[in-house]
Structure formats: structure tokens, C-alpha cells
């Protein structure tokens, strides 16, 4: 299968980044617990998960019957992500971001008219969510939260495999999954 | 050895430990270089595994070639990371005899061989998962997480190949020991 130039460049970017991780970089300074900062980052992720849930709920009305099984399985995992993130925000003294009304999300989405539209939008959203989690890693102070963010990002990457199969496109084109595909 | 470091080793990199490879010593010496070296060792095992599965017709060629090629790129990336740290890249550990359990898996037929690959990918994911809590250089977090996400996709594809649920968990942590 052909690999897009953009995919190649994204992968090359990660490979270059690995080579630039020299030992003269300043190690992370543990400046004390920054629960509030972590809570803010978690809330940003939570907002994206709410968006994903809304997209899957809306898309369930569009996708074909044979696509519903994996579609709903992914949707349920996004709900699990949202529940877990809400819990973590509360534990850190924050107020979890609330989901907006379905019609508010629908107004902010591109026009979705066909199963292909729904699948393509879901894949775009999953990529955006992967990218968001990966970019949050260096900002999260709590190592346990970094592990959780990586685990969720990996789960979202697995969703991309199912969506790719449903769309009839390459389900795993990248050796370095950065959400920039 | 700090308990957190031991947890890292047990989470995903216990196999090289059991095999007595230099990986265990490298990781135990601590630091990001130890983590990257341990990951590199396991990625090399993955390359060898797919090469052997392909050579024996024990995996669908398109799938096997894709996963093999990804693992080769992971190896290159991790070697580059070590060079960036001013560390020497350890000698290759990719001979089939250096991959514990591979010979038995290959002799067990297609399903056993693919399941072996699945378990190896699970250990890789588990190792990268643990590493996110251990790495000291924040610039390593994203690249290693991007590899973890790739291995997660490999898990989904291999589970599908084995007729298993491709996404059994909302929080993919790999094979925890």
C-alpha cells in the first residue's frame, strides 16, 4: 500500500526527535505536586472524549448495520475514558468538564450525511485525540497520569485500526502513531 | 534495585531478564538509556519473530511484512535515541536462538506462532507503558508513546488474525506480569 508523504514525514519527524534526545537536556524538575495543572490537562482530554462520544452517538444513525458492532464497541470505550477522566479530575479537586448538548456538537461537526462521512470524521477525531494525549505527556506531572494518557492514546490508536478496516483503507500505516495521519 | 525500576522490568521486559541477556543489566543500571536499551532488545526480538514467521509461511504475508517493517523502524528510532544520548548501540540480539520461546512457537504451527507474536507485542506495550512513569527526559515521552501506540495497533491486528476481540480494553496496557 502506498504511504502518503505526510505519513512518511510524520514518522521521520518522530525518528529525528528520538535522535535529538541527548543527555545534555535538563532532566525534569519535580517542583512539587501540580494537581491543578494536571487536572486542567485532564479536563481538556475529557472535553475531547465528550466530543468523541457525541460523534459516535450521532454516527450510529448513519453507519451500516454491519458496522454497528465495532462502532458501538469503540463508543463504549470512549465513555469509559470520559468516566475515568471525570473521576480523576474530581480526585484532584477540579470540576469535570461537562458534555454539551448533542445538538451543540452536531452544529460544530462537519455535515455528516453518509456512512463514509461518519467513518471519516470518526477517524479524524481519533487522530486528533491521539495527538492531544501524546502532546500532554510532557506536561503531566504525575507519572501515573502519564501512563494512563499513554494507555488511552494506545487504545485510541487501536480504534483507528477498526475504523480503517471499516473504511477499507490501510488500518495501520504508521510505525510511529502520532495522530498526524 | 528501586521497586519502580523492578516494576518496569517485570511489566514488559521480563523475558530478556529470564533469558539472561545484557538487557537486564542495562535496564538495571538505570536511567533513560537503560530503558531505551531494554526496549531496543525486545524490538529486535520482534523483528526476528516476524522474519521467522514470514519465512515459514506462518503469518499472512501482508500483515507479517507490515509488522516486521514497523518493528524495524522502531529499532532504528531507538538506536538513534541511544546515539543521541552519546551511548553505544548494543550489538544485535536478533538471531532466532536469542528470542526465548520462538523455536517452540514456530514448531507449534501457525496459531501458536501468531499467538507468540501477540504475547511479544503485549510485552512491548507493557514495557512502554511502564516507561512513561520512569523516563527522566521529557523529550523521550512522545516518541516512545508513539511506538507504544503502534504496538497497540499490532495487538489489534493480531487479535483479529486469531479471531479474538481486537479491542478488549479501553486502557491498553499490554501484558502485565
Image (tube, coloured by chain):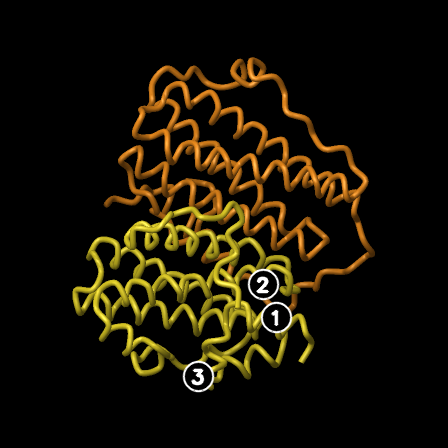
Q: Is residue A133 above or below residue B30?
A: above
* Residue picked out by circle 2: B130
x, y percent for residue A48: 58, 32
Mark 3 secondary-structure assignment:
helix
* Residue picked out by circle 1: B7
Q: Which chain is orange?
A: A
Q: Which of A63/A157 is in front? A: A63
Q: Are marks 2 and 1 on the same chain?
A: yes
Rendered image quadrant of residue B21: bottom left
Q: Are marks 3 and 1 on the same chain?
A: yes
x, y percent for residue B18: 47, 82
Q: Which mark is residue B19?
A: 3
Residue at horizontal 18 percent and vertical 69 percent from the top: B55
Q: Is residue B154 visible in this depiction of the protein?
A: yes
Label 3 or label 2, whichever comes before in sequence order = 3
Q: Tag 1, which chain?
A: B
* Separation of residues labelled 3 and 1 (CA atoms): 18 Å
Q: Is residue B83 visible in this depiction of the protein?
A: no
Amino acid at each position: 500500500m502506498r504511504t502518503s508523504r505526510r505519513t512518511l514525514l510524520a514518522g521521520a519527524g518522530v525518528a529525528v526527535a528520538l535522535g535529538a534526545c541527548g543527555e545534555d537536556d535538563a532532566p525534569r524538575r519535580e517542583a512539587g505536586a501540580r494537581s491543578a495543572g494536571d487536572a486542567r490537562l485532564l479536563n481538556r482530554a475529557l472535553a475531547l472524549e465528550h466530543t468523541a462520544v457525541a460523534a459516535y452517538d450521532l454516527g450510529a444513525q448513519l453507519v451500516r448495520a454491519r458496522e454497528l458492532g465495532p462502532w458501538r464497541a469503540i463508543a463504549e470505550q470512549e465513555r469509559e475514558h470520559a468516566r475515568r477522566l471525570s473521576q480523576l479530575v474530581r480526585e484532584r479537586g477540579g470540576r469535570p468538564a461537562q458534555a454539551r448538548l448533542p445538538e451543540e456538537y452536531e452544529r460544530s461537526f462537519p455535515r455528516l450525511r453518509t456512512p463514509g462521512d461518519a467513518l471519516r470524521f470518526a477517524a479524524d477525531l481519533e487522530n486528533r485525540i491521539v495527538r492531544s494525549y501524546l502532546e500532554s505527556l510532557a506536561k503531566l506531572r504525575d507519572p501515573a497520569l502519564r501512563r494512563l494518557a499513554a494507555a488511552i492514546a494506545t487504545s485510541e490508536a487501536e480504534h483507528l485500526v477498526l475504523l480503517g478496516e471499516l473504511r477499507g483503507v490501510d488500518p495501520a500505516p504508521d510505525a510511529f502513531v502520532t495522530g498526524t495521519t | 534495585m528501586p521497586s519502580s525500576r523492578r516494576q518496569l522490568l517485570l511489566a514488559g521486559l521480563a523475558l530478556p531478564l529470564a533469558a539472561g541477556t545484557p538487557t537486564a543489566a542495562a535496564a538495571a543500571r538505570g536511567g533513560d538509556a537503560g530503558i531505551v536499551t531494554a526496549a531496543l532488545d525486545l524490538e529486535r526480538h520482534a523483528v526476528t519473530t516476524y522474519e521467522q514467521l514470514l519465512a515459514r509461511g506462518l503469518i499472512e504475508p501482508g500483515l507479517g511484512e507490515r509488522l516486521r517493517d514497523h518493528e524495524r523502524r522502531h529499532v532504528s528510532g531507538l538506536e538513534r535515541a541511544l546515539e543521541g544520548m552519546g551511548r553505544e548501540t548494543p550489538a544485535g540480539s536478533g538471531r532466532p536462538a536469542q528470542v526465548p520461546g520462538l523455536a517452540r512457537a514456530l514448531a507449534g504451527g501457525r496459531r501458536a506462532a501468531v499467538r507468540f507474536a501477540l504475547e511479544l507485542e503485549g510485552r512491548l506495550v507493557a514495557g512502554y507503558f511502564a516507561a512513561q512513569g520512569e523516563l527522566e527526559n521529557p523529550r523521550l515521552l512522545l516518541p516512545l508513546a508513539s511506538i507504544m501506540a503502534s504496538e497497540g495497533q499490532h495487538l489489534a491486528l493480531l487479535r483479529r488474525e486469531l479471531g479474538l476481540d481486537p479491542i478488549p480494553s479501553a486502557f491498553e496496557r499490554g501484558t502485565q506480569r
